[in-house]
Amino acid sequence: MRYTPSPTTTSWQCPARAAVFSAGSWGTALGKVLADAGSDAVLYARRGEIADGINTHRRNPAYFPDVQLPSALTATSDPAAALDGADYLVLSIPAQSLRANLTTWAPHIGPNTVVVSLMKGIEQGTGKRASKVISEATGVPAGRIAVLSGPNLAREVITGQPAAATIACPDQEAARRFQAACHTPYFRPYTSTDVTGCELGGAVKNVIALAVGIATGMGLGHNTTATIITRGLAETTRLATALGAHPATLAGLSGLGDLAATCSSPLSRNRTFGTHLGRGLTVAQATAITRQTTEGVKSAQAILDLAHDHDVDMPITNVVTALLHEKITLDKAATLLLQRPPKPEHCPRR
Ligand SMILES: NC(=O)c1ccc[n+]([C@@H]2O[C@H](COP(=O)([O-])OP(=O)(O)OC[C@H]3O[C@@H](n4cnc5c(N)ncnc54)[C@H](O)[C@@H]3O)[C@@H](O)[C@H]2O)c1
Ligand SMILES: O=P(O)(O)OC[C@H](O)CO
């Protein structure tokens, strides 16, 4: 039986105005969530034809041509117009392009606008999480920077299938307000103050999903993928807690929840990219057939550098990074993981 979402209710409606930058997969899906929650949502689209498609035909022709969008979700190609009077700036662009884009957009951010990051990547070269990049590039204080992360495959969310997420912000009131702005009968956000755990759970799960994809592409079965997921969560938790995260966050929606969804779904771009590698494609070949943002490919080295800086052992991330740089073969990757020295299952750093 197909799941049919119940009609949108008005019980959580709030008159917030949210500007979502930009109109890719997750931006469009979260824009619809905000509109369905009763918020006034506007998408910023770089390409005029996408904004036109949304305003005229209620469709995003590039990302979800088959999905009808609500009339409360509008679009513009003018960043200043999108940000005019916005209570929230919701950012959903590739993490590596964040700093440069914010330099252009920052002058239009209002003095009370809360910036919400949906991004699951770590900046190359600096090892910085999106919230830190936002604070540096815009001067917005930490209390006005939130992160939303969880098991949120965009196509499932935009078609109204039930999902939940974590909204983390040092200012609990700001998190609660954004929770109200995006709470619908099919999308249930929880609040947290653990921004570090939330962001690292989201970024590292992409690398672990690459590893699961590689194993799947090599024809390996569920014991192998379950082992990668479990040990992947262990190394994610080691890194996140070394950087100050609460361990419970990694067992929550933005940790285990997202890891489970991403590692098990063919909708995941990271898992799919890994599958291509596992089937023998080169990184260049896999990149050429991947049209959308695959954060794990760009963030793996930065995550590994962070781990080295904090003396944390991340064997799966290490092997995935070596494969992405074509320093080892697939056979060597399996050997490297399985022939590590024996150790107890639970160790804080190793
Ligand atoms: N798709 C999902 O299911 C999903 C779910 C949760 C989180 N995320 C995260 O959201 C972020 C965005 O992912 P997505 O899936 O929407 O990607 P996408 O590839 O579908 O869309 C990316 C968007 O960013 C824009 N963009 C691309 N390069 C840009 C640049 N250099 N400067 C400015 N804009 C640029 C594109 O025009 C597009 O609107 C990623 O960090 C991803 O990890 C995605
Ligand atoms: O398609 P991916 O691999 O970027 O994953 C999408 C989301 O992060 C799942 O929560």
Image (cartoon, helix red, strand yellow):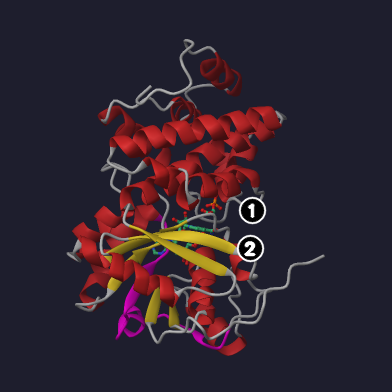
For the residue pair 253 and 325, the one nearer the viewer reads as 253
Q: Which residues are magenta?
A: 70-94
Q: Circle 1 is placed at which residue position?
A: 267
- Give the percent coordinates (x, y) of residue 65: 65, 74
Pick whichever of labels 1 and 2 is earlier in the sequence: 2
Residue 156 has which mark? 2
Indicate left or right for 123 with 340 as reference: left
| Residue 77 falls inside the magenta stretch | yes
For the point 40% across and 36% down, which residue is it?
237
Give the amino acid type for the residue marked by disc 1 in the picture: Leu
Labelled pair 1, 2 in contact (Cβ < 8 Å): yes
Mark 1 → mark 2, Cα distance in angstroms: 9 Å
Q: Which quadrant of the rendered structure holds the C terminus?
A: top left
- Give the percent coordinates (x, y) of residue 329: 56, 22
In the depicted structure, whether residue 299 falls above or below residue 172? above
Query: Which residue is outermost to the right?
Result: 1
Helix, strand or loop at label 1? It is loop
In the depicted structure, whether residue 298 falls above or below residue 18? above
For the point 44% across and 49% down, which residue is it?
202
- Give the percent coordinates (x, y) of residue 216: 67, 34
| Residue 243 falls inside the magenta stretch | no
Quadrant for residue 105, please give it: bottom left
For the residue pair 232 and 60, the one nearer the viewer reads as 232
Q: Is mark 1 within 8 Å of ligand 2?
A: yes
- Give the percent coordinates (x, y) of residue 284: 54, 40
In the depicted structure, whether residue 134 falls above or below residue 66? above
